[in-house]
Image: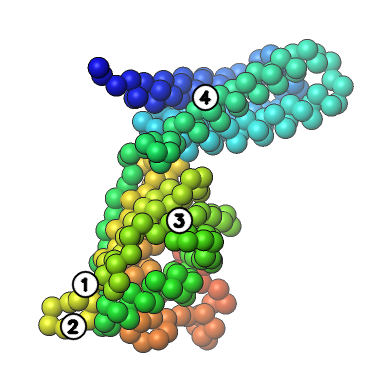
Amino acid sequence: MPSNSAQPATNHEQLARGLGWFSVGLGVAAILAPRSLSRTAGLRPHRLLLTAIGLRELACGVGILTQRRPAGWIQARASGDLMDLTMLGIALASNRPKKARLVAATAAVAGVTALDIYCAKNLRRGPRGRTASGAIHIEKVVTINRSPEELYHFWHSFENLPRFMDHLISVRHIGENRWHWVAQGPATFRVEWDAEITDDRLNERIAWRSLDPSDVDHSGEVRFERAPGGRGTVVRVRLDYRVPGGLLGARLAKLLGRAPEQQIDVDLRRFKQFMETGEIARTEGQPAGRSRSNSLKFDRPIRNDLAAK
């Protein structure tokens, strides 16, 4: 008999689309008819606030409707709902008139929040609890004038990775084959995840995947292959990842300068420089340099080299 295992996922996708259209409708109402929406909810009209809420809802709605499994956008909706619940709670505590409307609006937002959380949780789960398909695939290669043994052992000591991966803050061992990672995301945000080593071949290959729940859902591998003629080692990195919002979120990450394909390019060049010279060239502290090199307009020398190409 045919399996019905895919039916729950289909239902969750339909729920997500319904939430997406709801978000679009609410966004349009908040922008075009803020006074009517305020009266319905029992709130005092505040055009600027409702316009901001409307734009947020429109962005979430478009994100949900343009992605097949838009768990990240649903989660963004849930975060917005929590902000709205906070605002409604403050209004309820102020003993305003039309409290019955406020109570009804609060109950409605709480119900939608529960739906958002439920939908996002189930959309993020695929077979065996892993994230569903649709990951973005990238591969990068660099040749380094060092032996596979040297590069493998340096990389395998994962605490070394922040020495050349400038977005990494720390990597900490938390158990057998498991590590906790902390990285700098866009702006001042930090992202954290746990990952496990899924394959480890001495001097040849290290493979990993993130564990649920995780701010960064991905899997990947690094390979160390002896270059022809004994001219160092070819290092190949493969990464499959998902970002909240799918392709739209990936484009936003690229604009913010934190897209994984950009970051891996930079990391591999820094890895090559570090392993071949023992240091990484920087402009910080030099007379013509800056005290810090973390802006998107004036980035590190390696980023500038990549941009020139």
Provide the residue designation for mark 4. Answer: 23
| Callout 4 amino acid | Ser
Of pointers 2 and 1, the one earlier in the residue sequence: 1
Residue visible at 54% across and 77% down?
Answer: 290
Q: Which mark is residue 231?
A: 2
Q: Amino acid at mark 1?
A: Glu
Crowdedness near tag 4: few (<14), some (14–19) or many (≥20) residues, C-alpha within 10 Å: many
Q: Earlier in the sequence, mark 4 or mark 1?
A: 4
Location of residue 46 with respect to 143 vertically, above or below: above
Q: Which residue is mark 3?
A: 195
In-front residue for pair 97/210 = 210
Say which residue label 1 marks.
Answer: 225
For badge 3, the amino acid type reads: Ala
- Nearer the observer: mark 3 or 2; the answer is 3
Q: Secondary structure at mark 1?
A: strand
Residue occupying image coordinates x 67% and y 34%: 83
Q: CA distance from mark 3 to mark 1?
A: 24 Å
Task: Tell me where residue 172 appears, x and y as whole percent.
Answer: 53, 65
Q: Quadrant of the N terminus?
A: top left
